[in-house]
Image (cartoon, rainbow, N blue to C red):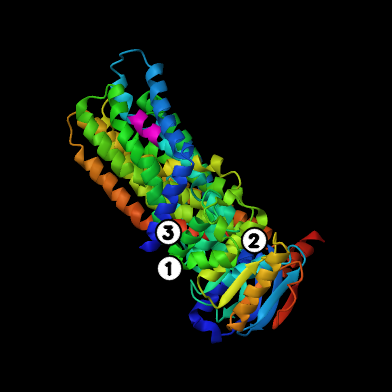
Amino acid sequence: MNAASQPLALRDLALRRGPRLLFEGLELQLAPGEVLHLQGANGAGKTSLLETLAGLRRAAEGAIDGRPEAGGLHWLGHRNALNLNLSVLENLEFWCGLNGVEPAACLPALERVGLARLRHRLVRTLSAGQKRRAALARLLVSLRPLWLLDEPLDGLDRQGLELFAQLLAEHAARGGMAVVTSHQPLPPGLSGVRSLVLG
Amino acid sequence: MASWTWFHRLASPPSFFRLADRLAPWFGLLAAALLAYGWIDGLFFAPEDYQQKDAYRIIYVHVPAAALSLSLYMGMAVAAFVALVWRMKLAEAAIIAIAPVGASFTALALVTGMLWGKPMWGAYWVWDARLTSELVLLFLYFGVIGLWQAFEDPRAAARACALLAIVGVINVPIVKYSVDWWNSLHQGSTILKMGKPSITAAMAWPLFASLIGAYLLSGYVILRRLQNELLLRERGTAWVRELLGASRV
Amino acid sequence: MRALAAVFRRELRLALRSRMDWLLPLLFFVMVVMLFGLGARPKDPALAGFAPSVLWVGALLSMLLTLDRLFRSDYEDGTLEQLCLAEAPLTATIAAKLLAHWFLTGLPLVLLAAPLATALQLPDAGLAPLVIGLALGTPVLSLVGGFAAALTVALPRAGLLLPLLVLPLLAPVVIFGAGAVRAALEGLDAGAPLYFLAAVLVLCLTLVPWAAAAALRNAFE
């Protein structure tokens, strides 16, 4: 984890979706080891802000400092980015291939999220919670300083929530940063969590 | 950088709106005057062509329409390039302000070309190189308009249309060349060979006037469409509310 | 390079798991040609004259069937976001995807063309220009079609729009491709149109991956 010492700073950020102004004048600092919990009503712009942080969308105004280069952040969208006709392992290995990560890292990651036994099953046959776990496995195959997670708790059962809390705590302890949108409260036991309510 | 500030001020929607408001009437008036002269003189007073008789008079509509069909596509591509590179709102609005105008002139050029073809070639449609590439051009315009209407977000729509317009403009010379080549392979049966007809001054003046008039007319329509488009996109901003509030009284 | 191989391998694997997806367009191609033959008089000598354009238009139409889902499933399941954010550049990923698309839909058309052409009584002199032309032209169909598919990936009913976007752009390919065959049949040199097809292919290869990448990124805004 190399860029962990670099904080993330939003300066005077304004976002627009179509003709609608979502918010403006957003100022924010995120230091290594901190987790930001993004909250807000539906349509307040949580996902749009996350997409802007990732570089998928452009800000209408303002700037983001300290954003890692391509391949320096993990993105977990509200969709899992898993192809239903590929197995869990094939999906993960494809992601590794795209990102220059050794495929050997896949099996330990799948073990960690509890899917090692199911790794040859087609994603089509998994439950919603299992799919979410498979998507979480991507966060573990390569260490990256910034995690951007859109509703990561969706579909996770109680053990899944505990697992997620552990993964996030370990990430923060390594000096990683995370921005998490969630309607539910984040699992307890995380330190360094800040909240931002949009809208 | 100081020399660029006027440009940025001009390109900002409210100041361009005001400029267009001042310019458009002049475009409209001049276009009306030139077209009135060009068409009345061209259709009634210019001498008859010794070979084509009165049928040639359609050039006073056909030639300006054909010239505009290409010029407007080029103009749209330039706006597309500016919209993509500098993400300028005005250029984004210009793409869609131009496209239907260009499509209309292309359709007009096609229809007048076909009407002209009947007495000249004996058929409304022959696979003539210019007619055929004009038809492909019409479809390229339709593609831009169709793509525009499919999007909800005007900025995403503008960028998609910009990409398509640029790919299209690269395609236009290829289409032209390919149709020329294909036509040369098949020429002979239908096409009446006409040497380059020399044109007398009495024929040329009205043609020239209607050509300039048509350019000004399209300028007028595009300026008005741009104003509309800007109002629609910027609705809810202070300057639009101010403008509409003032005119509503 | 590894990223390209990963994309290519994934596309082939997915194609193997849903074979109908790429077999049906081929069947469609064969059926179009067959119905055209059935629509003509038996042993009509004019059939050979229409063979090049029938084969080219058939190839174009069957290619069109495959375009809508080229990027759609990736867009819908979120893979496209990962492609945009991956270490491998998006242009390279798209190039690999389109290469796989051509391999699965274009190449079989090239291979099917010769037997179908003989069924339409195309004289032997026209076979080589037809096959070479398709080999040069079908990648252009994949590339231009991929660009249009990228433009419309976020639109719910892109299927209706795709033909309007793609067909006018591909008019030159049909003209040169079918023209090469006709030129050969008339005893003219088929080289010029084929060289021109090759030039169009090179132009598309250099231009399309960038244009398609810009179009895909636009889908998020």
Left or right position of B131 against A145: left
Mark 1 on the same chain as mark 2: yes
Measured as percent of width and height from the top left, residue A192 is found at: 69, 83
Asked if residue A177 can be seen in this view, the reply is: no
Q: Residue furthest right?
A: B249
Highlighted range, magenta: C53-59
Q: Nearer the viewer, mark 3 or mark 1?
A: 1
Q: Nearer the viewer, mark 1 or mark 2?
A: 1
B55 lies above or below C198? above
Mark 3 on the same chain as mark 2: no
Measured as percent of width and height from the top left, residue A190 is found at: 71, 79
Q: Residues within 10 Å of mark 2 (few under 14, many from 20)?
A: some
Q: Tell me the amino acid under the disc marked 2.
A: His
C218, B136: nearer the viewer: C218
Q: Is residue C191 covered in magenta?
A: no
Disc 2 secondary structure class: loop
Residue under pointer 1: A102
* Spatial CA span between label 3 and label 1: 18 Å
Q: Do callouts 1 and 2 mark residues in contact (Cβ within 8 Å)?
A: no
Q: Tell me the amino acid under the disc marked 1.
A: Glu
Measured as percent of width and height from the top left, residue A2 is found at: 49, 83
Q: Do callouts 3 and 1 mark residues in contact (Cβ within 8 Å)?
A: no
Q: Residues within 10 Å of mark 1 (few under 14, many from 20)?
A: few
Q: Tell me the amino acid under the disc marked 3.
A: Thr
Residue under pointer 2: A78
What type of secondary structure mainly makes up the magenta span?
A: helix
A47, B30: nearer the viewer: A47
Q: Please tell me in which quadrant of the rendered image residue A80 appears.
A: bottom right
Q: Earlier in the sequence, mark 1 or mark 2?
A: 2
Disc 3 secondary structure class: helix
Residue under pointer 3: C93
